[in-house]
């Protein structure tokens, strides 16, 4: 008889790695404005501070699989936990920008381990009838961590009013990282890995705890047969992935992997506060609105998990991507219609020296945010502009910030029911058995590279293209992706992997 509580407890413990990834990725959204002021960062410097973690995570993803085959899944997860803890502490205490980026990059090692080995371990220890739900704990923990990071950023912002608040935001991650490391001592090694290494007795003991005595014996024999079968098969290579017969399926997989990131989701997650500040609500309110992003993302991820096997993958993708396109076009229109004009009353709360410098443009109207920011930069200088940008936008902009909030939340909801969770389900189903592992690695690698580039250039886009044009670009990419989905994406619900291979691989 299966010991469901043992399986759930083990899966939840390992899924803490997903929580750490989610927290580490999103906590930076509350830090950005602080480090811009503290170190005078330019647009690409800020982009690199945010995106460097993703770059290292992308490299790590290709390395941790083979490493876990050598030293074990649990040890790789422990290395990831240590990397998370050192990265959080080092980033929080960083004396300068270079040290900060180095420790942020170290966090990418933890991210790579959590995203690859966490789900792999859970899949290997879970019985087939529980595997889908158990693996989903990792994705659910990532989404929960987004909400927690936004909320703790807001809490710390309200509790600590000086310029050290950002250090506490980052340093807080040390607590769950240490707890994750300690908790790993109470979970077993993957039974599949133990059998690969000939440690049959230890593997059998774990399988009996999870499945009961009789089923544990059967499961061990099934795993050993699978290992023997894999050993006799020729290993797949990168050339197999790009063979002519794989043209259609790889086209679909790569399109989905690119689309998930090129529509700007990580710009919203990682720069949420900065985006909300562009609507003129001010820094404090931006922290509050960022919490709504996390809550909506969590709620609609749960919706997707509940309906994906009933509605199917293709309808969710069509509905969600259409929502993304409409949301981005709506946001582009709202910012495109915004006007910028300073009055004596609107700048009355600023320092007297700044008010005097702004007198040449008081009463002058600017058609877009780029012209307005460039004018402010010329009058005030880079250092003052970096510190006062949010206040200046609040004083000048004419826009409905509630409509901006609704557009952002609509975008996040649309993503959470489609490209967020559904992409990974599709990638696990589309590729043939013999090359699935390497094909998913290729798609995930492309996805990570696009994510890195989106994060890197977003501050530059805001400064040089403007908010309206940036969102318009994301919307156009989404529209192109929607047309490709309508044309090429098959429904995979209810079909066996073999049926999909016959349908897609020519």
Image (tube, rainbow, N blue to C red):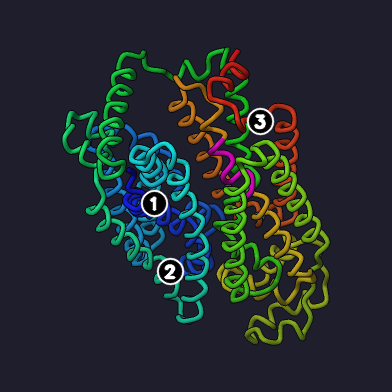
Q: Residues within 10 Å of mark 3 (few under 14, many from 20)?
A: few
Q: Is residue 331 magenta?
A: no
Image vertical order of residue 70 relative to residue 270, above or below = above
Q: How many marks?
A: 3
User: In front here: 439 or 492?
Assistant: 492
Reply above or below: 339 against 14. below
In the rendered image, residue 202, in percent from the top left (x then y), is placed at 18, 38
State whether residue 438 is above or below residue 240.
below
Q: Earlier in the sequence, mark 1 or mark 2?
A: 1
Q: Nearer the viewer, residue 185 or 284?
A: 185
Horizontal side of residue 353 vs 322, given as left or right: left
Q: CA distance from mark 1 to mark 2?
A: 22 Å
Asked whether the beta carbons under mark 1 and mark 2 sit within 8 Å of each other, the answer is no
Query: Dot 1 corresponds to which residue?
Result: 15
Mark 2 neighbour class, 10 Å CA radius: few under 14, some 14 to 19, many 20 or more: many
Q: Earlier in the sequence, mark 1 or mark 3?
A: 1
Q: Quadrant of residue 351?
A: bottom right
**In x, y percent, where is residue 393?**
70, 71
Q: Which mark is residue 169?
A: 2
Residue 139 spot, x, y in % from top left: 48, 49
Please state if 178 lies on the left or on the right of 359 as rendered. Answer: left
Above or below, comparing residue 54 to residue 273 in the picture: above
Q: Quadrant of the N terminus?
A: top left
Left or right: 359, with 389 as reference point:
right
Q: Main secondary structure of the magenta part?
A: helix
Q: What SS does tag 3 mark? A: loop
Residue occupying the point 69% across, 69% down: 376
Magenta residues (range): 417-425
Element type where label 2 sits in the image: helix
- Residue 141: % across, % down: 46, 55
What residue is shown with label 3? 491
């Amino acid at each position: 008889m299966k010991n469901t509580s043992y399986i759930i407890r083990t899966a939840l413990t390992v899924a803490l790695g997903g929580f750490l990834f989610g927290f580490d990725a999103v906590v930076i959204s509350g830090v950005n404005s602080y480090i811009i002021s503290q170190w005078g960062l330019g647009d690409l410097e800020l982009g690199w501070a945010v995106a460097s973690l993703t770059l290292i995570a992308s490299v790590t993803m290709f390395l941790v699989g083979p490493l876990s085959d050598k030293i074990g899944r649990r040890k790789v997860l422990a290395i990831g936990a240590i990397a998370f803890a050192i990265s959080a502490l080092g980033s929080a205490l960083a004396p300068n920008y270079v040290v900060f980026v180095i420790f942020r990059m170290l966090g990418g090692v933890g991210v790579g381990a959590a995203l690859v080995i966490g789900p792999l371990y859970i899949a290997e220890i879970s019985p087939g009838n529980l595997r889908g739900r158990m693996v989903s704990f990792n994705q659910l923990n990532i989404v929960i961590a987004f909400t927690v990071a936004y909320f703790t950023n807001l809490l710390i912002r309200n509790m600590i009013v000086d310029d050290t608040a950002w250090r506490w935001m980052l340093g807080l991650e040390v607590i769950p990282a240490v707890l994750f490391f300690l908790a790993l001592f109470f979970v077993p090694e993957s039974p599949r890995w133990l059998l690969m290494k000939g440690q049959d007795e230890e593997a059998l003991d774990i399988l009996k705890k999870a499945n009961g005595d009789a089923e544990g014996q059967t499961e061990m024999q099934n795993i050993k047969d699978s290992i023997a079968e894999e050993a006799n098969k020729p290993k797949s290579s990168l050339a197999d992935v790009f063979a002519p017969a794989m043209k259609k399926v790889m086209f679909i997989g790569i399109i989905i992997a690119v689309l998930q990131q090129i529509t700007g989701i990580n710009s919203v997650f990682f720069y949420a506060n900065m985006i909300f500040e562009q609507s003129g609500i001010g820094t404090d309110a931006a922290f509050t609105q960022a919490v709504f992003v996390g809550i909506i993302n969590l709620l609609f991820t749960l919706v997707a998990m509940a309906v994906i096997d009933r509605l199917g993958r293709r309808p969710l993708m069509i509905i969600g991507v259409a929502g993304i396109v409409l949301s981005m076009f709506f946001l582009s229109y709202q910012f495109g219609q915004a006007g910028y004009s300073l009055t004596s009353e609107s700048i009355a709360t600023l320092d007297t020296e700044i008010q005097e410098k702004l007198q040449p443009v008081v009463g002058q109207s600017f058609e877009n945010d780029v012209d307005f920011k460039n004018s402010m930069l010329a009058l005030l200088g880079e250092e003052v502009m970096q510190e006062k940008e949010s206040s200046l936008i609040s004083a000048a902009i004419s826009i409905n910030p509630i409509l901006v909030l609704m557009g952002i939340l609509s975008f996040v909801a649309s993503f959470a029911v489609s490209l967020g969770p559904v992409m990974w389900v599709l990638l696990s189903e589309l590729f043939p058995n013999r090359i699935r592992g390497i094909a998913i690695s290729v798609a995930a690698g492309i996805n990570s590279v696009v994510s890195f580039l989106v994060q890197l250039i977003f501050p530059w886009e805001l400064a040089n293209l403007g908010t309206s044009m940036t969102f318009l670009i994301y919307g156009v990419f989404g529209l192109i992706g929607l047309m490709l989905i309508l044309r090429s994406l098959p429904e995979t619900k209810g079909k066996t992997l073999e049926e999909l291979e016959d349908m897609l691989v020519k």
